Image: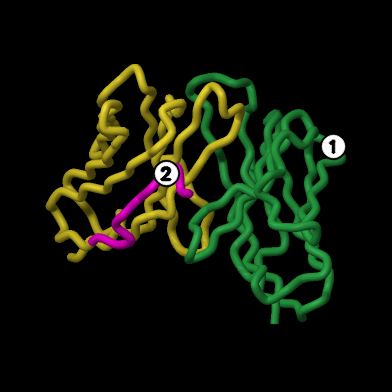
Amino acid sequence: DAGVIQSPRHEVTEMGQEVTLRCKPISGHNSLFWYRQTMMRGLELLIYFNNNVPIDDSGMPEDRFSAKMPNASFSTLKIQPSEPRDSAVYFCASSSGQGRTNEKLFFGSGTQLSVL
Amino acid sequence: DQQVKQNSPSLSVQEGRISILNCDYTNSMFDYFLWYKKYPAEGPTFLISISSIKDKNEDGRFTVFLNKSAKHLSLHIVPSQPGDSAVYFCAASGRNYGQNFVFGPGTRLSVLP
């Protein structure tokens, strides 16, 4: 399996522009997570889906952020409008989502977002 | 308030010596703990895990110890190698957390040749 695939790897945009990050989870995985990494807060969970349904979006910073999972093999994280403080590395991760005690996350390579 | 804490932002160790990375948690509902390693420009990769029914889990050079009463876990790397230089994240999950994993802020380990 190719693992979790994220695109783009790097995104540079201007303040106010819309940004869309994309993720393809590992085939057969039922849970998908969006994390953001910053120097101040480390890895923080933004939202996670189970069977394409958003389960917990309490980590989404504000209404400018939205995430969708239209099918089991694709998810997007959208920021509209973007602001400089959104600059960070955004990671997508997936897991089998079967609720086993030995569950683990598999991460993509991340999207480095810079908002100027 | 951070539920998973890694109080050492960085650690330097000589090659061949032991590296000890520490992690503390506050939520007693956590019952499953993981360590992830992250190289620059890559996503975190799973390293080792431990369930709360155990107090030790070993995998090659890596051992994780869990002290439930102190809500503390540690990762030991013996012997340390330059290739171990990376950021290490501690993560926790629990039955009442659904599929969620809570990560600590990470510790940057540098293994000096």
Quick check: is B3 in the magenta stretch? yes
Depicted B101 relative to depicted A84: above or below: above
> What residue is rendered at 57% in x and 46% in y?
A107
Q: Residue at x 36, y 27 (%)?
A: B50
The residue identified by callout 2 is: B4
Q: The disc numbered 1 marks a residue on which chain?
A: A
Q: Which residues fall within the magenta stretch?
A: B1-11
Labelled pair 1, 2 in contact (Cβ < 8 Å)? no
Instruction: Say the numbered circle drawn on residue B66.
Output: none
- Letter of the green chain: A
Q: Percent position (x, y) of residue A28?
A: 70, 28
- Which of the chains bears the disc numbered 2? B
Q: Quadrant of residue A90?
A: bottom right
Disc 1 from disc 2: Cα separation = 32 Å
What chain is the yellow one? B
- Per the picture, the main secondary structure of the magenta-coloured stretch is loop
Q: Decide whether residue B86 is among the magenta residues.
A: no
Q: Amino acid at mark 2?
A: Val
Tag 1: amino acid: Asn
Snapshot quadrant of residue A17: bottom right
Q: Residue most toward the top? A: B53
